[in-house]
Image: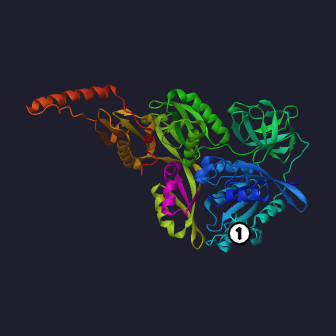
Amino acid sequence: MENIRNFCIIAHIDHGKSTLADRLLQFTGSVSDRDFQNQLLDDMDLEREKGITIKSHAIEMNYSFEGKTYILNLIDTPGHVDFSYEVSRSIAACEGALLVVDATQGIQAQTISNLYMAIDHNLDIIPVLNKMDMPSAMPEEVKDQIIDLLGCDRDEILSISAKTGEGIEEVLKAIVQRIHPPKGDVNAPLQALIFDSVFNSFRGIYAYFRVFNGQIHTNDLVKFVASGKEYHADEIGVLGLTPQPRKMLQAGDVGYIISGIKNAKEVSVGDTITHVENPCEAAIEGFSEVKPMLFAGIYPVEADEYEELRSSLEKLQLNDASLTFEPESSAALGFGFRCGFLGLLHMEIVQERLDREFNMDVITTVPNVSYKVFTTKREVIDVHNPSGMPPLNNIDHIEEPYIFAQIITKSEFIGPIMKLCLDKRGVLKSQVYLTTNRTELSFDMPLGEIVFDFYDKLKSCSKGYASFDYHINGYKEAKLAKLDILLNGDSVDALSTLIHVDHAYEFGRRMCEKLKELIPRHQFDIAIQAAIGSKIIARETIKAVRKDVTAKCYGGDITRKRKLLEKQKRGKKRMRQIGNVEVPQSAFLAVLKID
């Protein structure tokens, strides 16, 4: 165990985590030149296309230093705030972390929040200053920021360029010298933490784990503590670029177990593996339960694909533990699932993965956050969906979730950012100058205001320079109204939203205009209305497609034309009574892109 080092790489988006991981793998000879490609650990097409890390990835490297061979277990983590749960799981399985900071941009909001998470777990932090080869690098200024944040000495900060490979050997030496080896008792009962899992259609579920105490051998009879199920360890091994089987793993090791599990519900991330005959006394307290930030309904386009969608979501949940879902039904869309996500990007990625990995065509409803409704009977109801709202006369008041938001930006963008946050009902809490031209702004804001387009607007008004991080800060009372969209008098529950009273009129009007563009013309008039309760606040009409029935009627009396038009009018009226409006998928997503 003296020769094992378990560490992760944490950083803000685009500060060079994946590139640094590539260089470490090349330098330690863990990947041959023939197998190498950029963003090596990002094995999803989506990750390469978008240039972001979505999943944390574990890999083992061997490094020789001063005559000894060390085993380095690296877990590469995502940087986006929507995937912070992946980071928390990686941190729970490690003893140290490389804190990567971009020398051209300095410390960003996500860097700070990931650092605090690592400090809470008592990890050894190695500060690394990346992108030193860039002409716009500001090493001295950024080093001052790191010293202010960490309280470390200036010579503890490593200056590297992950792109050119400069300084990589110093990083490997620092990992060996500064990160303490894992603690644990090889002879104690087995105690291992599951930090990730993945579904393989041939071999069942691969569970990735970190052994804290004891040993595990091939064919041992093991038990998963949370589910209480017992299995034979058919194969165990370590995580190279491909899984590498081993006969035994012991305290300090990171590896995988295959035991022929086919049912996704039996493996949960954060569970403890132990032996059946000599179990450990207590499960490992790994990490906190995930709290979804926003909710949306996911429905199959074809109603008979409901069960297929359920199994796809279960398999996806194995690989993405922050996804939660429960069944629900909608009058407009039939049977589907109410899913909880950590943010809009997370929702987009889940939709994309359902399409690519499981071939599922789905319709997603308007996302919304969770509200607490206090009724006149002194009950408290958690409402994740506008259709779950009790009648207006039974509601005493509604409370909505608030967040504490930290925004770090250049001083020249303070004005537009403040205006954006105040428009979103934010309250400025503090404004701190980190350096002469960098400021940290703190706001209290309603979560419901930021889930739609806040992040995009923030990037636009700061030319991409603002970084944003937030955490839930409790609930506050709010004046909210349920806004219904009616098509020919019928409410479409999938388009309902809960919205602040001050914004309801404008949002309803824009919504009607948008739907008028997106819903195709039918054989009859369609009235699109936005309503709060029984009060209509906006209306648009889609005119019917008309056939020129008077074309064959030339000359003669006007009453002949009138007669034909009246006949057509009666037909349209009858058609409207039996015809139903077809709403395309793009209309359900219209709300997101209403601007």
The residue drawn where x is 71% and y is 30% is: 262
- In the image, 416 versus 220, the foreground residue is 220
Q: Quadrant of residue 512?
A: top left
Is residue 409 found left or right of 528 in the rendered image? right
Q: Is residue 285 visible?
A: yes
- In the image, 345 versus 398, the foreground residue is 345
Magenta span has 454? yes
**Image height check: is 582 above or below 126?**
above
**Image height check: is 247 above or below 252?**
above
Residue 1 x/y as whole percent: 88, 51
Q: Dot 1: what SS?
A: helix
Q: How is the image coloured?
A: rainbow
- How many numbered marks appear? 1
- In the image, 188 versus 166, the foreground residue is 166
Residue 291 x/y as whole percent: 62, 44
The amino acid pointed to by label 1 is Ile
- In the image, 550 versus 93, the foreground residue is 550
The residue drawn where x is 61% and y is 34% is: 312
Q: Quadrant of residue 556?
A: top left
The residue drawn where x is 64% and y is 34% is: 314
Mark 1 = which residue?
Answer: 147
Q: Quadrant of residue 284?
A: top right
Residue 574 x/y as whole percent: 27, 25
Is residue 116 found left or right of 95 in the rendered image? left
**Image height check: is 453 above or below 169?**
above
Q: Is residue 421 visible?
A: no
Magenta span has 53? no
Residue 411 x/y as whole percent: 53, 69
Q: Which residues are magenta?
A: 441-468
Residue extending farthest front: 34
